[in-house]
Every structure is written in C-alpha cells, then in structure tokens.
C-alpha cells in the first residue's frame, strides 16, 4: 500500500451547488463495499485514478477473486495500450482488501456501497457504516433503483448520502448517474461530481425517484425485448441487433440483461411496478421462469444466451 505522499486527493468546494458556504471536502481514501462485479470495477477505476482504495467484503475468497480479476483487467489494459504500465502498477499499490468493514470505513473519506439490490440489506449496512465512518465521510450507494431517501434515513448524516450509480463494466462505461435526495447537501454533490471527473466519468444528476433515469429507461426497453422474445417475434440476437444497428445502442437489451443479471433485472422490475403503480414494468413470465430455474445470465452460464466465458451463444426459445 502506498504512503500518503503517493496519493492524489480530490478537493471539492460547493461552487454552483445549493449551499455555497459549506466547507471544502477532501477525498483521499475510497472504501468500496462488496467484491462482486460492480464493486471490483469501482475499486479498479478508483485506484487507477490515484485514490487510495480499500475493497471490503465478508468473504476472503470473494476478495481474492476480485483482486485477481482486477490485476488481470489492468494487465489487459496495458497489453492493449490503453493503460500505461506505470499507472497500472501504481493502481495495484494503491489497492488493498479487507474483511473488516468497520476498520476500513474508519479511515474513509468516501464509502461506495455495491452490494445486492436489497433495501433491508442496504439500510442495515448504512447504519453500520454511519457508526464506523468519520463524521465528514460521504456514504454513497451504487443502487440502480432503490429509494435513496430510505437508505439515507438509516443514518444520522442524510446530507452526506448520495447515489453513485456506475455501469457495467465499470472500467469501460463512461456514465456515472448521481442521485440526490432532498437532504443531500451541495457539498456532497460537489464532491461526488469531482470524484466522477477524477474517475474519468461523464456525470448526470437526477433526483431520487423510482428507477432514477437510466434504470427506468433501460428497463422499459429490456422488458419489451423480453416480451418480443417470448412471443417469438425474433431471436434474441436479432432483437439485440435491431437496437445495436438501428438505434446505435452499443449492446442489445437481452445481452445487456444477461450481463447485469436476470435476478437483478427482476428485482428492479418488481420494485418499479410496485412504486409506480403501473403494469408497464410488470416482469414478463419468461423472466420469472428463467430466474426460478437459476438461469441468471453470464454469471450462471445461461440466460437469454448460453455463455462460454465472454462469448454469448444463441439458444432456442
């Protein structure tokens, strides 16, 4: 782990934010909670941006896998000429792992939660983070659809809670959706914007509402694509190609669902259908059936496609 002299700190004032009198906030240490696909991606880009980064998880095995995945990803970046060798080596030195959440959070300037999309789980986690993190630390959630106001209410610092919704794969996708509640302070928003800039992301700011902007739009397309597939309108590959070639989407909705996880998409759809009181987001039968069978997409080897490593192979309905 690199010493303090090797770290680059982010200073974010409240310029342009609601409360211009709030103090400047320093971001030097980022703690990422959850060593799954999103957590490891967030940790990678944070370390690559020159921030001291601690990736935490309850499972030492999950942390070992995440470390190996990050090392492999950094090396691929070097081999493809996208990442200088020196930057990759610096990122490795800035990244550490821990199974001790409280100890890691105690040294954090910014905590980014990236655990499973379960509101009760996140509320409990934020209560524990609130107790362990320094009073000035920002607590951020990577949730893609859950009510941030309720997550923030689990803490004694709702003004320092913000949504930082990254996209998969984090090192590649340029967007960072920032979600503010009615209580998120101007200083907190300014700091999150500064972090996004340091990470090389393009940021958008939305208010806390069901599905925010991206999940609501993306899910509407994804669910309709599932219904079309279920009805036999076209194959999964042709439905995806329709959006890729006809609307310049970088990836079709069914392949994207496989990457995100069918279980994740189902949870978001159920949540939006309930919160918005509309059947627009009612999950199609095929989504429920595939999840019930454990066919969750790439992570399980099959979803709307069959997966062999990184390769998506078409299957029959």
Image (cartoon, grey):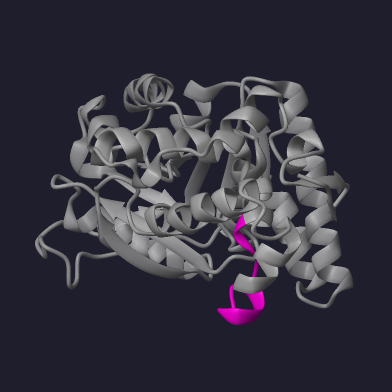
Residue 21 in view, yes or no: yes
Q: Position of residue 44 (x, y in %)?
A: 66, 53
| Magenta-colored span | 244-253
Residue 252 lies in the magenta stretch: yes
Q: Residue at x 21, y 29 (%)?
A: 153
On-image quarter of the N terminus: top right
Tell me: residue 197, above or below residue 44: below
Q: What is the quadrant of residue 100 in the picture? A: top right
Q: How many marks?
A: 0
Side of 104 relative to 296 (left or right): left
Q: Position of residue 54 (x, y in %)?
A: 59, 39
Side of 26 relative to 219 (left or right): left
Q: Nearer the viewer, residue 143 or 283?
A: 283
Q: Nearer the viewer, residue 105 or 206?
A: 206
Q: Position of residue 303 (x, y in %)?
A: 73, 41
Residue 203 lies in the magenta stretch: no
Q: Nearer the viewer, residue 303 or 149?
A: 303
Q: Residue at x 69, y 71 (%)?
A: 241
On-image quarter of the C terminus: top right
């Amino acid at each position: 782990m690199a010493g303090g002299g090797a770290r680059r700190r982010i200073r974010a004032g409240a310029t342009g934010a609601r409360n211009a009198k709030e103090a400047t906030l320093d971001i030097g240490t980022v703690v990422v909670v959850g060593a799954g696909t999103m957590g490891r991606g967030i940790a990678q880009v944070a370390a690559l941006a020159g921030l001291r980064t601690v990736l935490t998880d309850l499972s030492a095995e999950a942390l070992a896998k995440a470390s190996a995945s990050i090392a492999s990803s950094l090396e691929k970046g070097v081999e493809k000429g996208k990442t200088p060798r020196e930057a990759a080596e610096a990122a490795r030195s800035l990244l550490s792992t821990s199974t001790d959440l409280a100890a890691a959070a105690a040294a954090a300037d910014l905590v980014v939660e990236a655990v499973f999309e379960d509101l009760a789980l996140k509320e409990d986690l934020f209560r524990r983070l609130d107790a362990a993190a320094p009073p000035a630390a920002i607590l951020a959630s990577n949730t893609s659809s859950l009510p941030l106001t309720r997550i923030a209410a689990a803490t004694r610092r709702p003004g320092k809670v913000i949504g930082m919704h990254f996209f998969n794969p984090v090192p590649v996708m340029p967007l960072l959706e920032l979600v503010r509640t009615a209580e998120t302070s101007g200083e907190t928003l300014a700091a999150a914007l500064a972090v996004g800039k340091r990470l090389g992301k393009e940021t958008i700011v939305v208010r806390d509402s069901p599905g925010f902007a991206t999940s609501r739009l993306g899910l509407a397309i994804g669910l309709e694509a599932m219904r079309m597939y279920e009805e036999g309108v076209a194959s999964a590959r042709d439905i995806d190609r329709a959006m890729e070639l006809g609307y310049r989407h970088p990836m079709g909705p069914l392949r994207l669902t496989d990457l995100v996880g069918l279980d994740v998409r189902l949870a978001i759809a159920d949540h939006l259908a309930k919160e918005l009181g509309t059947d627009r987001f009612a999950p199609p039968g095929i989504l429920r059936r595939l999840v019930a069978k454990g066919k969750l997409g790439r992570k399980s080897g099959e979803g709307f496609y069959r997966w062999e490593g990184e390769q998506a192979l078409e299957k029959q309905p």
